[in-house]
């Protein structure tokens, strides 16, 4: 985690906000050598785990087409 004086943060605030958003790395802001705030990226929490990776996982196989494989199953 990066540490920075409040005066330096004040001068570079907008640039640092963009940097934190891109990298995800937090910055601790100090005043008189003591930590007073932490700048960290805002992340919206997922509402549910279902659909969390929608659009990220892709399959090149045809998942609907039947297989030409004989199954050995016991009849009830």
Image (cartoon, rainbow, N blue to C red):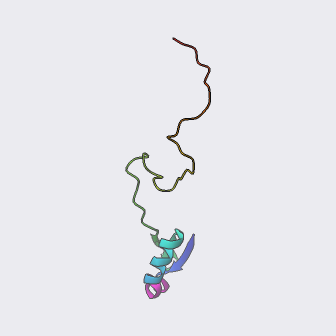
Direction top: furthest residue: 76
Near-viewer residue (64 or 19): 64
Q: Which residues are magenta?
A: 7-13
Residue 13 sits above or below residue 47 on the image: below
How far from the left and from the top, in percent, is residue 14?
Answer: 43, 83
Q: Residue furthest left?
A: 47
Tell whether position 10 is magenta: yes
Q: Residue at x 49, y 86 (%)?
A: 8
Can you say whether 48 is above or below 74 in the image? below
Q: Quadrant of residue 41?
A: bottom left
Is residue 20 inside the magenta stretch? Answer: no
Give the percent coordinates (x, y) of residue 49. 44, 46
| Towards the viewer: 39 or 66 | 66
Residue 54 lies left or right of residue 75; in this view the side is: left
Q: Quadrant of the N terminus?
A: bottom right
Which residue: 60% across, 24% down? 71
Q: Position of residue 47 (x, y in %)?
A: 37, 50
**Viewer-proximal residue among 63 and 38:** 63
Extreme residue toward the front, this view: 68
Q: Residue at x 46, y 78 (%)?
A: 18
- Magenta stretch, main secondary structure class: helix
Q: What residue is drawn where x is 55% and y is 50%?
A: 59
* Residue 67 can be seen in this image: yes
Can residue 28 be seen here? The reply is no
**Front position in the image: 62 or 1:** 62
Marker count (numbered): 0
Asked if residue 11 is positioned above or below residue 55 in the image, the reply reads: below
């Amino acid at each position: 985690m990066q540490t920075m004086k409040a005066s330096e943060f004040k001068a570079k605030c907008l640039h640092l906000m963009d940097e934190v958003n891109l990298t995800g790395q937090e910055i601790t802001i100090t005043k008189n050598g003591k930590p007073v705030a932490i700048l960290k990226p805002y992340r919206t929490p997922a509402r549910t785990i279902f659909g969390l990776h929608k659009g990220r996982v892709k399959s090149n196989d045809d998942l609907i087409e039947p297989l030409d494989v004989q199954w050995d199953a016991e009849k009830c």
